[in-house]
């Protein structure tokens, strides 16, 4: 993957900027509040992800109280939208909203503004598979790092531009993250994500710009928690 940029790599750069603006904490608050309804592993994962992003303890506790009913109870629901971007790129948008009708209208408008379109359930999802993903710092000898990580219970390992990405079965994410911590690797981020089974290679800069502009608008929407896309852009175009 070195020399190319897929969406998981681009997102890490964007999340670093979101963290500076505090916007990422708002997304984590929603994630924690919804997870607090069921508790258990989903809540642990949400809280650990927030802690990894240095979200203040008070913010985390407020989000848990809100979701568990100890605070003012919200009516957030999780919805997944599917669509296509320029060049037929498949896009999945995960949202948390208190007004599904408003949100889908706004998401549709974003797609259409940048030459894309919303699609029905299942139109895009089959192009992706759910994994747990832990991104660790590459270090000076990435190949040695990869060889060490191969001994863990992982499904796939990729060298990205800014990290080593370790993919696990969804249920093993927490275990593998702790093992990597124990080995002394610096964990940059971890999450459940939809990994594209086949990537669409983007060769034209105009198309690359259109796709990234579309993804930017989706990520900036207040209800959007996470996006997945199957583009692969040559780093020379960025």
Image (cartoon, rainbow, N blue to C red):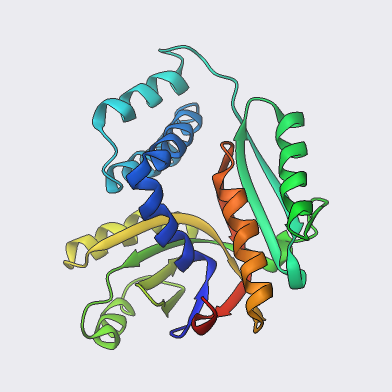
Residue closest to the far front: 206
Residue 190 falls in image quadrant: bottom left
Q: In the rendered view, tell whether residue 25 sits above or below residue 36.
A: below
Residue 90 in which image quadrant: bottom right
State the residue at coordinates (32%, 72%). Answer: 152
Where in the figure is residue 69, as x and y percent of width and height? 46, 15
Q: Residue at x 40, y 61 (%)?
A: 13
Q: Is residue 59 left or right of residue 5?
A: left
Does 123 appear above or below 24?
A: below
From the viewer's side, name the closer residue of 159 and 216.
216
Counting from the top left corner in percent of width and height, residue 20 is at 33, 46
- Above or below — where is 100 with respect to 150? above
Q: Is residue 129 left or right of residue 179?
A: right
Where residue 235 appears, as percent x and y from the top left, is 49, 81
Tell me the residue at 32%/28% (across/down). 59
Q: Nearer the viewer, residue 20 or 147?
A: 20
Q: Position of residue 34 (x, y in %)?
A: 51, 31
Q: Is residue 118 left or right of residue 27?
A: right
How many numbered dots are placed on residues in this image?
A: 0
Q: Quadrant of residue 146?
A: bottom left
Residue at image x 43%, y 62%? 133
Is residue 199 visible in this depiction of the protein? no
Camera sees residue 100: yes
């Amino acid at each position: 993957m070195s020399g190319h940029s897929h969406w998981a790599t681009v997102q890490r750069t964007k999340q670093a900027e979101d963290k500076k603006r505090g916007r990422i904490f708002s997304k984590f608050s929603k994630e924690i509040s919804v997870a607090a309804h069921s508790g258990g592993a989903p809540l642990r994962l949400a809280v650990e992800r927030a802690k990894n992003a240095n979200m203040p303890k008070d913010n985390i506790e407020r989000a848990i109280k809100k979701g568990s009913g100890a605070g003012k109870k919200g009516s957030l629901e999780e919805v997944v939208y599917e669509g296509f971007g320029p060049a037929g790129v498949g896009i999945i948008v995960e949202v948390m909203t208190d007004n599904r009708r408003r949100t889908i209208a706004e998401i549709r408008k974003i797609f259409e503004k940048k030459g894309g379109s919303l699609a029905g359930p299942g139109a895009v999802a089959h192009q992706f598979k759910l994994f747990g993903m832990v991104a660790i710092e590459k270090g000076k000898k990435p190949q040695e790092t990869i060889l060490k990580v191969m001994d863990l219970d992982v499904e796939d390992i990729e060298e990205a531009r800014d990290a080593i990405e370790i993919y696990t079965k969804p249920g093993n994410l927490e275990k593998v993250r702790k093992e990597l911590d124990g080995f002394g690797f610096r964990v940059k981020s971890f999450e459940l994500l939809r990994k594209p089974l086949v990537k669409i290679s983007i060769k034209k800069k105009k198309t690359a710009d259109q796709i990234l502009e579309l993804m930017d608008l989706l990520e900036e929407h207040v209800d959007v928690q996470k996006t997945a896309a199957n583009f692969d852009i040559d780093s020379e175009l960025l």
